[in-house]
Image (spheres, grey):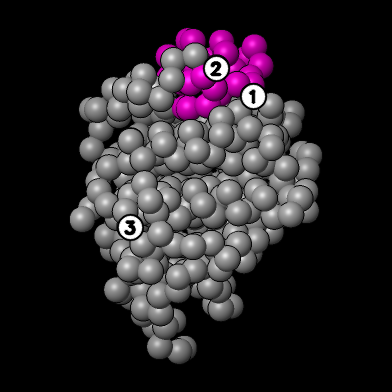
Amino acid sequence: MNRNQQKMKDILHDHDFYVDFTPHCFWPPQPDIHEAPFVLFGVPFDETTVSRPGSRYAPSAIRAASVNLDTYSERADVDLEDVKIYDLGDIMIAYGNIHETLRRVELIVEDLVKANKVPIILGGEHSITYGVAKAVDDAVILDFDAHMDAREEYPEGMRLSHATFIRRISELIGPEKIFQVGIRTYCKEELKFAQEKRLGFISAYDIYKNGLPTTVKKILAQLESFNQVYISVDIDVLDTPYTPGATYPSPEGISIGTLLDILMNVVDKRVIGFDVVEVSPPYDFSDITAVNATKIIFENIAFIQRARS
């Protein structure tokens, strides 16, 4: 075991064997996990994806894109060159066993939060957020997404997948601890569930119609009574020109500028971690989607750093 592996073991305790020790480099790199308040890791998992698979390759694509983006955030007035970020690598996937894979996500996130680290998770498909929710069940889940992902089963017979994870999280922590932003595609079953359970959401159309100040005000009102916030960003919350490599692209989304402006106004010191999911590199023309995902990650880190300074 090398020195870095030993340091990792100090944080992850008995769960370090779930991590791939192959060298990884999210920019800017930080060699010491103990000194880094932000710890990033990938979950290269897309086994429940029905169409446009390939999000298992997203962690590598996002890391590659990170090297070519400048690190200064004008919105936050923070330069990531001054922020310590440790790249843990990728979780080892239990192929054919989604429950075991998500259990590993849960254990790693739980260890990082206990060590006062901010976990940053690169998907993979959106089902990984269920594993996170089990580790941070005191937090409200703020989900930026085109899809409601609240089906009972999808595909038929599968109760836990990228299209059902919100329903499963609601059963775990309660629908009152979930709020979705940018929603614009759902089936009758999902809308009925949302209405019956009072699952809160703001549609993309609401954002267009009401504007940024009203949108921010509504989100902050939903978060007001919670001490911890976890943010999940499905890349398909953005409109299709920004996401040619989304797993399930959907028209009439918001722009990346709108998303970042919302995040700039709602991210505060209560945010304990976030993920960015559903980038599918095989469909990603000119790496546009991976670059936008990386920009979201850079800005979110900067916003959290600003809030905690």
293 versus 193 height, above or below: below
Which span is picked out in magenta?
180-208
N-term-proximal mark, 3 vs 1 = 3
Query: Can I make out residue 115 in this image?
Result: yes
Q: Is residue 205 magenta?
A: yes
Left or right of 292? Residue 119 is left
Label 3 environment density (alpha carbons within 10 Å; few <14, some 14–19, many ≥20): some
Spatial CA distance of label 3 from label 1 is 31 Å
Identity, as a three-letter code, of the amino acid under mark 1? Glu
Callout 2: helix, strand or loop? helix
The kind of residue on which mark 3 rests is Val
Q: Which x, y percent locates residue 300? A: 41, 49
Mark 2 Cα-neighbour bin, 10 Å: few <14, some 14–19, many ≥20: some
Which residue is at a point 36% across and 40% down the rendered structure image? 264
What amino acid is at disc 2?
Tyr
Residue under label 2, please give it: 205
Q: Nearer the viewer, mark 3 or mark 1?
A: 3
Q: How many marks?
A: 3
Q: Mark 3 or mark 2: which is in front?
A: 3
Q: Is residue 151 magenta?
A: no
Q: CA distance from mark 3 to mark 2?
A: 31 Å
Snapshot quadrant of residue 92: bottom right
Residue in the image at 63% along x and 32% along y: 239
Q: Residues within 10 Å of mark 1 (few under 14, many from 20)?
A: some
Residue 158 image point, x, y percent: 68, 34
> Does the residue at mark 1 contact the one at mark 2 (Cβ under 8 Å)?
yes
Residue highlighted by disc 3: 78
